[in-house]
Image (tube, helix red, strand yellow):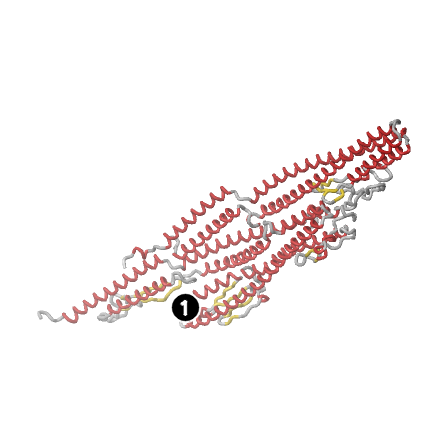
Amino acid sequence: MTARITQGMMNQTLLYDLRNVTTQLSTSEQELSSGYKLNKPSDDPYGASQALKLRADLAANTQYQSNVQDANSWQNVADTALGDIGDSIQRARDLVIQGANDTNDASDRQAIVTELNQLIDSIKTDGNTQYAGRYIFSGTATNTQPYQLGSNDAYSGNTAMITREIGVGVQVAINTPGSSVIGDGTGGLLATLRGIVNDLQSGNTNALSTTDLNALDTANDTLLNARAQVGALSDRLTTASNRLQSTEQSTTQLLSNVQDADMTQVMVNFSTQQAAYQAALRAGAQIIQPSLMDFLST
Amino acid sequence: MGLSTFMGLETSLRGLLAQQQALDTTSHNIANASTTGYSRQVAVFQASPAYTMPGVTTAPAGPGQIGTGVDVAGYQRIRDAFLDVQYRAQSMLQGQAQANQDGLQQVQLAFNEPTDSGISSLLSNYWGAWQNLSNNPEDMGTRQALAQSAASLADGFQSLSSQLTTLQSQTAQNVTDQINQVNNLGTQIAQLNLTISKITATGNSPNDLLDQRDLLVDQLSALGNVAVTNGVNGSVDISFGGASLVTAGTSATLAESDLTSLSAGKIQGLITLRDTTIPGYQAQLNTIASTLITKTNAQSAAGFDLNGNAGGAFFTGTDASDIAVNPAMVSNPALIAASATGAVGDAGNALRMADMQTTPTIGSATIDAAYTQLVTQVGADVQQATNQVDTTTALTNALQNQRQSVSGVSLDEEMTNLITFQRGYQASARALSAMDDMLDQLINRTGRVGL
């Protein structure tokens, strides 16, 4: 005997199948409207964990890029200031050679001294360069002006390093303490220039052309070294920026693979499901309505 | 000796009556085709007791017994008790899976992931704010931005925690409601038991009341494990979750503590959610929040604020339910300990805070990874619950179909029966007419030859 099929069974089966197709339709619809195949963690728990991780990676990457940007701007400001100091040293060197000439009389040397004093203030002003309201040659004491104009050559900053994180666990020092380039009252460029001024005033031309000139060259070497470091760091930052950008690109691609819906596929699925739904509805209308009753005469 | 002249009339009358009763039963079936829990009924025909021809010398004698027509022996309810047991067992599992899925889906909604407003994104913003502060440790605006994004993160934790607590208390309320429903069903079954045993005692079968009672037991089985024992006079004794719920005409009022051996069902599903699943998620969330609080505050204490003083607590509270940013830091962001040395331009401490993002702090997992794990677990739990609901629903439907195959009303079949019984009625009436003609012949025309 064949199984007894009743109207109730057909109703129930039709309803169950219609519900299934409707659920699938609504899922596809959500994917289409949101553009994501990952709308809830339960859609794909592993994918969801990947998506969360990749999103965090992307946010961190953007942050590192902004850190690199900031470090780069800092380097540009520092490089300009150090360049100006270099120019001042060149001018000072010319003046020393001029002052070492024995044909100069006291008033000529006094004129040179006046210009040298102006150069010293100019170098200090460069040492007081600010970036976004911060003294960049002041170590970590960024709100302390490192040099006072005038006769006081003391360095008020510190020699601590300021670092920027440009990758996971990758930190670079971005600052150059003023004391290592310009020096303080007791040594370095400023002390050398003060010595030159003294020698000019005392007429010690011998010292000017020997020890003073040598000391000035040494100070210039120190400066060039500092500028080379800034340049090298700029290169490194550019490399880091490129690397971060390419990582960003690949992470975005990965994230898209994990969470974005494949529109073509979803559209095809959606159409198929819609066809199935309509077929089920039509079949339901055909199956449920007629019974033997429709074919019996009264 | 012979039979009564009018015996044929009686036989036809029995036929007419029986066909009519069968037609009534068919009408009853058709009328109840859509009634939930209805089992189709059949009028059982039985040949009425035969008449034994009395003999002259010995009995029995003559040709033997002569049939006297048909009787309706009873109205049978077509139902398979074995399928009932199977259906109820499956319905119990389905009820549990459904309760589990409903609860977990709400938990998943509370997590609100993956979106830009979920804790995952808030964490990213928070770490980014520390990085920004490490770039600009002197800037009050940057400090304020950090305080704000930390406050958003704390709000995110608090909001999720309170949503989980609400879900848990709603589930607890639902458990109470469902147990009330059990007691309510128990009362109805006990009342039906009383009526059923009265009718059964008179020898009748109260088919429609039995259907109603079976439907109530079906509903009960979705809530938990039900054991049905047949009692006297058609009444049933029912135990629910290991506790006696119905004994003949009396029902007990059960409390949650009475359900000592609840094995499955909606109530069990809700209890698991209330006592295990949701508290489990909450514990994990609290671990993440409390780790964030203690590690951040320890790091803060190791650093210095903008005034060169040792850093105070950055977060207040102990877990996800009460985590908040220290109000002093919000009103005066200069107190945020970004410096590792005390120098204003030093951002070593801020960097160390930011590095917490990539440092394992909860076992071998970072805070972000621990949270992602929690979200993944919720997602996997929902997925598993959904699969369970799909499977148990399909099985329950299959069993319901099997039951319908046995007990359901088939309109085609009823229509066929309608024709059969209608024709039977017509035929009996025709037999009656034939008998009437014969009697007319006998009474009015016999002995009147030539008239």
For this rendering, which residue is in front, A8 or B418? Answer: A8
Q: Amino acid at mark 1?
A: Pro
For this rendering, which residue is in front, A113 or A210? Answer: A113
Q: Position of residue B402 (x, y in %)?
A: 43, 56
For this rendering, which residue is in front, A23 or B15? Answer: A23
- Which residue has dot 1 on it? B206
Taking the view exactly as shown, the residue that stands out farthest to the left is: B450
State left or right for residue B399 relative to residue B71. right
Give the vertical position of B360 relative to A220 (above or below): below
Visible in this render: residue A167? no
Give the vertical position of B326 relative to A115 (above or below): below
Q: Residue at x 71, y 37 (%)?
A: A76
Q: Position of residue A217 (x, y in %)?
A: 83, 30
State left or right for residue B200 relative to residue B381. left
Taking the view exactly as shown, the residue that stands out farthest to the front is: A107
State left or right for residue B402 relative to residue A295. right
Q: Position of residue B397 (x, y in %)?
A: 46, 55
Q: Position of residue B326 (x, y in %)?
A: 71, 56
Of all chains, the one bearing label 1 is B
Quadrant of residue B8 in the image? Answer: bottom left
Q: Secondary structure at mark 1?
A: loop
Visible in this render: residue B254? yes
Q: Point out the image quarter for the C terminus of chain A.
A: bottom left
Rate crowding at label 1 as few (under 14), some (14 to 19) or many (20 or more) other CA atoms within 10 Å: some
Q: How many marks?
A: 1
